[in-house]
Image: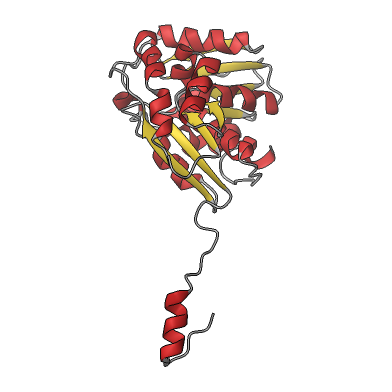
Amino acid sequence: MNIPATLTGADRQAILDHVRFDAGRNARGKIGFVLIPNEQTIEDEMLRHMPPGVGAYFCRAAMPREISTESLAQLRLSLAGAAARILPDDGLDVVVLGCTSGTVAVGEEAARAELAKGAPGAKTTTLAGAVRKALSAMGVRRLSLGSPYIPELNDNVVAYLEGAGFEVVAAHGMGLHYDTDMIRVSPDYLVEFARAIDRPEADAVLLSCGALRSIEVIDRIEQVLGKPAICSNQAMLWDCLRLCGVDDQLPGLGRLLREH
């Protein structure tokens, strides 16, 4: 609408009487992320890489500081409440538990059920579930797993993946207990780490954990290894977008978001 250089009284009143609307910032989809209290990677990465027209919104579930199976299982008590606090009057298209080891500790179906209680009508998913779907979409059957986890949690993720039908040919955790350490693992180191855990018989390398800044170097890792690589936040972004019906191919984020 062209506005005259000089407004008449009638022009001015017409503007004031007729508010115009557009589709808004999130016309293509609204995604809610339920995170653990000290998570400091996912929010920045989702906002940075979300395509135009898709909104990303966040809330924190409660759990103790130390990352263990017992502490992560306590997430179940607050998932519904956290999901309910994200756009309570507008509603979400998708809601996701943004924690791989938390999904495994709570149980994928149990986590999704709790999210659905808080955000009825939204499609529900989890970070571990997103990884599972991404591996299947890439045709991966055998993989090498790397994570920042203590042995207990790394073993839990191996069991989850094997229960989903994948063969884990190698698995290594960094032995870190706290998110505040996991977020400081250097992306350059992650490239070296991926090379160290890779095995010739693996179809792909998986770097598990939303706290790691793996998405920054996932393209480099694939180039160095000459095979597909999946990381948690890349898989979560892909899964949530596809659940929203957004099929954009995003460059620089690995084969998954370029080809699937």
Residue 68 drawn at (x, y percent): 36, 11
Q: Name the residue: 46% across, 87% down.
A: 11
Which residue is at a point 47% across and 89% down the rendered structure image?
4
Looking at the rendering, which quadrant does residue 149 occupy? top left
Instruction: Give residue 111's position: percent from left, percent from top.
Output: 49, 19
* Residue 223 place in picture, x, y as percent: 60, 35
Screen quadrant of the C terminus: top right
Query: Where the N terminus falls, by quadrant?
Result: bottom right
Q: Is residue 245 left or right of residue 233?
A: right
Colour setting: secondary structure
- Residue 36 is left or right of residue 52, and the answer is left
**Is 158 placed above or below 2 here?**
above
**Looking at the rendering, which quadrant does residue 83 occupy?**
top left
Res 174 visible: no
Where residue 71 sits, quadrant-wise, is: top left
Q: Does 133 appear above or below 13?
A: above
> Toward the viewer: 246 or 114?
114
Residue sitting nearer the eye, 161 or 92: 92
What residue sits 47% from the left and 70% below the top? 19
Q: Residue at x 40, y 41 (%)?
A: 44
Q: Position of residue 103 (x, y in %)?
A: 48, 18
Q: Which of 41 and 98 is in front in this view?
A: 98
Is residue 153 something one can see in this rendering?
Answer: yes
Q: Relative to 65, is 89 on the left or the right?
A: right
Q: On the picture, is 194 further left or further right than 39?
A: right
Q: In this view, does 254 lie above or below 157?
A: below
Q: How many marks?
A: 0
